[in-house]
Image (cartoon, rainbow, N blue to C red):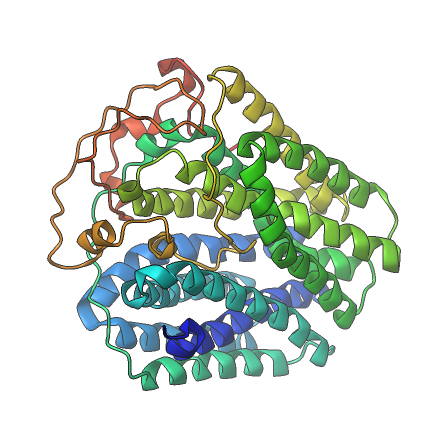
Amino acid sequence: MTNPLRTFASLYSTTLLMVLAGGLLTTYLGLRLSVMNVPQIWIGGMMSAYYVGLVAGSKIGHRLIAQVGHIRAFVASAGIVAASALGHALVDELAVWLLLRLVVGMGMMCQYMVLESWLNEQAESNQRGTVFASYMIVSYFGLILGQGAISIFPELGLEPLLLIAICFSLCIVPISLTRRLHPAPLVPAPLKIAHYWKKAPQALTTIAIGSMIVGSFYGLAPAYASNLGLPPEKVATYMTATILAGLLAQWPMGKLSDIMSRSRLIRINCILLGILALAIALTPYHPVISLVMTFLFGILGFTFYPLATALANSRVEQNERVGLSATILLTFGLGASIGPLIASTLMQWLGNSMLYGFMSACTLILFVRLRYVHAQQKAETNVTQDYIMATGDLVSSPLAAALDPRVDVESIQEHMTPSANLDEAEYDLGADGVDDDIIDANDSDEEQLAFSFDIEQAEPEAVQTDEADSHPVNLDKAQT
């Protein structure tokens, strides 16, 4: 049996360099804007623009890969992202920086789609779990290195931008020189948003509000720490401790989610994270205590997304999971775009500590919402082996679901190759009245859902409200 780490070494090397550069750029901009004493709303806007770019890039990525192929699409995206990163050194206009962040998000999503579709198509069925886990670990490691790299340049001059551009440029080399066969171009199919919200309301609500927390942390935590008087190297340590905690928490949280109900585990997570975030907001900074608390924050905050994803996947059939992942990506992107804007506004009006005050409020809203939905549904049944490791940041495309070892490979190939039969299936969007951990045994085996980001083609029912249903499954975003 071949070793996946050796087989996909070029793709993993590309992923490492790309995520390192992306993580470094995010932290650098947060610190740089803080040093420039710009209003907090601009810092939040920069992170929001990045996530908007990720969502928009998913649609552009499909078209680009279909037209020019995987390697050309990756090279073009990497070149645009590297140029955009260097653009911050040429122009000091904040509006231009906002546009550059949007472009970076779009370009990086195209890169993620190339890597994940490539890994999916060429991973052997008996190694898909190892391939996916290795990909996520490499992504985490890249994020950690990106945070640590900022400590090398405490002056926050042009050097970090040069290193970012170098990494984005070098990430082209491994994938360009790979000897592996190129995967087939991708073909999108309609996305059914309301269908998944009706099947997994608790999971998608968790992703919507949880992504607001994660987006706020990545976008504003560097500025928060800098406003406390920490030098860049201390800020890097603060960020690294949080991300490392998220990585270390994945396996034990996954095992715990196989023992107890995931919806109950998410509610417990809400309570603990809310208390912890409130404590961080009210407690004066202390070098050791603050580091311990942010470590605990990473354990709780960065496991919302995989817990919710596992809960959602337990509610759908195998051939629906790629379409579900597309809905999750859209939900995460919208939440992560809104969160930093709200948090930065509160920080500007009420003070630096409102970053964690906002996160604590988010957990309260999420807990109340989950309790309300759960009260309207029947008793849940545990489904095991659905937890899939995921990072706190949005470092994957909806194609990551295709790497999931639970997904039937043949059905995925039907959705991801030009020869696919893309006949659109019709779904009954009526409320089913069952809990998120119960799989509907009446779902037709012939239902086929692929993914697409032609959101304008979504059914009008995608904006249904609670009043139209027998239980609350609306599209309120107020986790990823």
Residue 216 in view: no
- 437, above or below 99, in the image: above
- How many dots with numbers? 0
Q: Give residue 363's quadrant in the image.
A: top right
Which image quarter is the N terminus in? bottom left
For residue 149, side relative to residue 375 (left or right): right
Residue 208 position within the rendered picture, expressed as x and y whole percent measured from the top left: 50, 39
Q: Give residue 187's quadrant in the image.
A: bottom left
Residue 194 position within the rendered picture, expressed as x and y whole percent measured from the top left: 33, 31
- 419, above or below 437, in the image: below
Residue 417 position within the rendered picture, expressed as x and y whole percent measured from the top left: 17, 59
Residue 431 in view: yes
For residue 291, side relative to residue 164 (left or right): right
Q: Residue at x 27, y 77 (%)?
A: 72
Between 377 and 221, the one lying in front of the other is 377
For residue 377, side relative to residue 448 (left or right): right
For residue 392, side relative to residue 437 (left or right): right
Residue 259 position within the rendered picture, expressed as x and y whole percent measured from the top left: 58, 37
Between 33 and 430, the one lying in front of the other is 430
Between 127 and 133, the one lying in front of the other is 127
Q: Residue at x 24, y 32 (%)?
A: 459
